[in-house]
Image (spheres, rainbow, N blue to C red):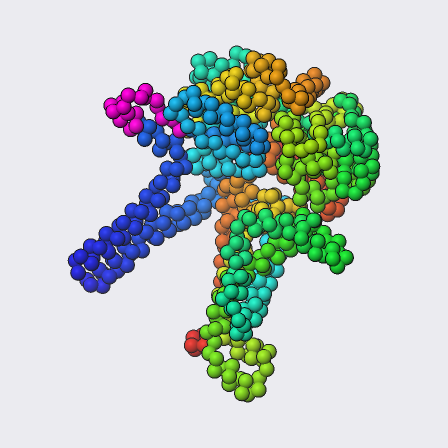
């Protein structure tokens, strides 16, 4: 009975969140599953079409392949680059430099601003034909292309923007590195291990749980990237679909072309793909993630 | 112990209530018209018993439109005038540029909280079919006066004998040119009878005479309006009354070849610059900046854009082909429509009438949405037209006099056609595809769009 009362209190405290979750998250998700089997133009009531939306996605949509290609290109470039960059900066910041707090804050700022529209607008200016980036290149005699408006390079400007927002990943790395016991390094130093050896033999293995965490989170985020592509391409995903990230295409289908049923189907395919990839990563983690408390 | 338990319950209930009310109020905010009606009843009952002021019913409306700053300013002034004449009425404006306007509106309609008054383009029928618009027929004559209107304009917003919108202005699409650049380059301003060869020559002359960074014309191959008039000029049609396309792959190849030749001659805006400085907005258009001589535009844009630049701007017809000019006759550029879910249809109708028939409102709004539809307002404005407005009036009457007598039909799923045409143009201009291959893809996709438009939902 006492136990039951404790539970009750717990659930009561949970209630506000639970209500929000059920009404604002769970039911829209369930609704989108239903809508994905319908033709729904937002204005008239949905009509059941079975699997037609899913079938059309893979057989009858000339933009879909472009969109999938661009999205994978973006994810597989930006995720490793962002993680490596964040790790390097974290290791450097951990070298006991002065004003650590200051640098940490400075490097974190892009992450705070990164998702915002303002930064995407700024990015567009910096990497335009006459932008600061090309002006800098001009000092070296290089005539830079229009990075955001050329279909060959546009995706790289998005990747660059994503890597630039390495701050939150870096903070987590830094915290992970600080958790590693100092005596391990001392012992290694006594045994004559160099900096690189200490990094590969101590830092990296003990950091794998943090790497795993960061990798998973960043991967999921990257698959859902929207704002950058929307702002930089003026909402078109152009030129020639070169910035048509999956979420942006989903938005265009749902809100510009009024095919909300189709867009819902796209959302579910994305969910399944991301779940699969995350699942594979969890399965693989037992082979490369090392928990120092002996947990395998 | 008891008090502890009670406080736990109290706190969590409070938290839950707060969350629920937060939820509730936000959804009410959305459909402010519905929540507004209740306080209005309350306040009128209390005021009638306690105060001596006349009981003006409190009505809160929302109105959305797109346009330039010039239009925003004028429309807001007109709204203020209406509010001052109708105490108790407030109209909250929701304005923006055209980018994303329709997306937002669709979402609002789907969520049941669309603005009471909505500015719309040529796609009214789409919304009528979906039962999203208020039938204005009951107010015609009693509240909305259309006697002074060209019947064609009334017909264009009438479906199944019911009126769903009122024209705000007659407009015409054509070419916007930078006269200062023509002058500098020593190229004569084209006449209404110019041809596609003349366009080519003028564009090449301007870009060579003015040098690097200056171009004769935007790459119009991505514009559906330009393509439609080109097809018309050669006796074809983008989309007919019969619901079919009336052009072949060969026409599309000719169209893109024409622009590719200009591109190779350096006379059109390069592909990447066209992407980063689109001609659709005044702040990015290179015609306004004096670097490109010609773009496509609708006539009512002229005044707003001219106000932003020292360069002298003007309006031109699309060139002629073997079958004459393919100009689309002037038509209603924008309508004002009412949301089917409005709580105050009578007041909405009153405002609609005010916008098109009130002389003072006419003075304020001028020609910001094209030539006003009501004859008396038109007469009133013509006596005091600015030179820029006069250019627009003259252009629209010229188009009316010379456009071929074709019943013009808007392509269904226009939005998707525009995106398709743009992707096709980009594939060609960035050398990612041959003209032949791009034209093949274009034809396949256009046919799919037409089929989709005809498939009942």
**Residue in the foreground of this view, choosing between A26 and A194:** A194
**Residue in the foreground of this view, choosing between B446 and A99:** A99
Look at 50% across and 56% down and name the residue there: A112
Look at 26% across and 53% down and name the residue there: B11
Look at 57% across and 87% down and name the residue there: A192
Total marks in image: 0
Q: For residue B152, say whether it is visible.
A: no
Q: Compared with residue B1, is residue B104 higher up or lower down, i.e. above or below?
A: above
Outermost residue, bottom side: A191
Look at 26% across and 26% down and name the residue there: B46
Provide the residue span drawn in magenta. B42-60
Residue B371's image quarter? top right
Q: Position of residue B412 (x, y in %)?
A: 59, 31
Based on the picture, tell me whether residue B263 belongs to the magenta stretch.
no
Q: Compared with residue B357, is residue B319 higher up or lower down, i.e. above or below?
A: below
Residue B42's image quarter? top left
Based on the picture, tell me whether residue B44 belongs to the magenta stretch.
yes
Q: Position of residue B345 (x, y in %)?
A: 41, 23
**Residue in the foreground of this view, choosing between B445 and A10:** A10
- Looking at the rendered image, the quarter that the N terminus of chain B falls into is bottom left
Q: Position of residue B250 (x, y in %)?
A: 76, 34
Q: For residue B379, say whether it is visible.
A: yes
Q: Position of residue A44 (x, y in %)?
A: 46, 33
């Amino acid at each position: 009975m006492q136990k039951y009362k404790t539970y009750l209190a717990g659930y009561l405290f949970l209630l506000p969140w639970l209500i929000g979750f059920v009404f604002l998250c769970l039911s829209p998700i369930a609704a989108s599953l239903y809508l994905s089997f319908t033709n729904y133009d937002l204005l008239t009531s949905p009509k059941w079409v079975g699997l037609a939306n899913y079938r059309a996605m893979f057989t009858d949509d000339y933009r879909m392949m472009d969109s999938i290609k661009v999205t994978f290109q973006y994810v597989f470039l930006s995720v490793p680059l962002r993680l490596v960059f964040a790790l390097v900066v974290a290791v450097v910041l951990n070298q006991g430099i002065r004003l650590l707090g200051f640098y940490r804050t400075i490097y974190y700022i892009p992450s705070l601003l990164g998702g915002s529209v303002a930064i995407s607008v700024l990015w567009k200016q910096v990497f335009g034909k006459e932008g600061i980036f090309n002006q800098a290149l001009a000092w070296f005699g290089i005539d830079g292309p229009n990075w955001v408006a050329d279909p060959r390079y546009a995706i790289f400007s998005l990747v660059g923007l994503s890597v630039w927002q390495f701050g939150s990943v870096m903070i987590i790395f830094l915290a992970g590195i600080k958790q590693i016991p100092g005596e391990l390094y001392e012992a290694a130093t006594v045994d004559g291990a160099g900096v690189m050896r200490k990094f590969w033999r101590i830092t990296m293995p003990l950091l794998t749980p943090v790497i795993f965490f960061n990798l998973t989170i960043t991967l999921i985020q990257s698959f859902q990237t929207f704002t950058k592509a929307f702002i930089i391409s003026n909402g078109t995903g152009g030129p020639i679909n070169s910035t048509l990230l999956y979420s942006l295409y989903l938005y265009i289908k749902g809100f510009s072309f009024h095919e909300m049923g189709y867009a819902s189907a796209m959302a579910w395919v994305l969910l399944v793909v991301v779940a699969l990839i995350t699942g594979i990563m969890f399965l693989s983690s037992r082979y490369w993630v090392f928990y120092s408390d002996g947990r395998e | 112990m008891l008090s502890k338990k009670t406080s736990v319950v109290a706190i969590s209930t409070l938290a839950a209530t707060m969350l629920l009310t937060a939820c509730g109020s936000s959804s009410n905010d959305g459909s402010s018209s519905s929540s507004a009606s209740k306080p209005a009843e309350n306040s009128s009952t209390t005021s009638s018993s306690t105060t001596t002021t006349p009981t003006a019913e409190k009505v809160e409306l929302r109105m959305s439109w797109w346009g330039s700053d010039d239009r925003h300013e004028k429309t807001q002034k007109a709204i203020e005038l209406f509010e001052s004449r109708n105490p108790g009425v407030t109209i909250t404006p929701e304005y923006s540029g055209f980018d994303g306007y329709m997306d937002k509106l669709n979402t609002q309609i789907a969520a049941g909280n669309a603005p009471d008054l909505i500015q719309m383009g040529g796609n009214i029928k789409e919304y009528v079919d979906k039962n999203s618009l208020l039938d204005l027929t009951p107010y015609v004559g009693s509240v909305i006066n259309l006697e002074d209107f060209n019947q064609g304009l009334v017909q264009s917003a009438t479906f199944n004998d019911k009126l769903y919108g009122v024209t705000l202005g007659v407009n015409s699409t054509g070419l916007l040119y930078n006269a200062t650049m023509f002058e500098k380059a020593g190229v004569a301003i084209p006449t209404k009878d110019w041809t596609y060869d003349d366009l080519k020559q003028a564009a090449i002359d301007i870009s060579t005479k003015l040098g690097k960074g200056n171009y004769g014309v935007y790459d119009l191959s991505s514009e559906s309006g330009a393509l439609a008039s080109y097809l018309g000029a050669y006796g074809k049609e983008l989309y007919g009354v019969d619901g079919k396309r009336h052009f072949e792959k060969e026409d599309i190849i000719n169209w893109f070849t024409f622009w590719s030749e200009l591109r190779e001659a350096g006379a059109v805006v390069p592909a990447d610059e066209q992407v980063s400085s689109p001609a659709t907005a005044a702040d990015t258009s290179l015609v306004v900046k004096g670097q490109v001589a010609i773009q496509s535009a609708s006539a009512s844009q002229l005044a707003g854009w001219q106000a932003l630049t020292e360069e002298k701007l003007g309006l031109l017809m699309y060139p002629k082909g073997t079958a004459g000019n393919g100009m689309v006759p002037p038509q209603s550029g924008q309508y004002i429509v009412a949301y089917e879910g409005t709580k105050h249809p009578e007041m909405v109708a009153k405002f609609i009438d005010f916008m098109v028939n009130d002389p003072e409102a006419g003075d304020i709004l001028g020609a910001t949405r094209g030539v006003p539809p009501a004859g008396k307002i038109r007469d009133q404005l013509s006596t005091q037209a600015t030179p820029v407005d006069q250019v627009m009036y003259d252009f629209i009457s010229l188009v009316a006099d010379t456009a071929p007598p074709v019943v013009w039909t808007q392509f269904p799923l226009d939005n998707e056609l525009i995106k398709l045409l743009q992707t096709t143009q980009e594939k060609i201009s960035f050398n990612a595809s041959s003209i032949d291959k791009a034209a093949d893809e274009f034809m396949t996709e256009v046919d799919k769009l037409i089929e989709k438009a005809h498939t009942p939902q």
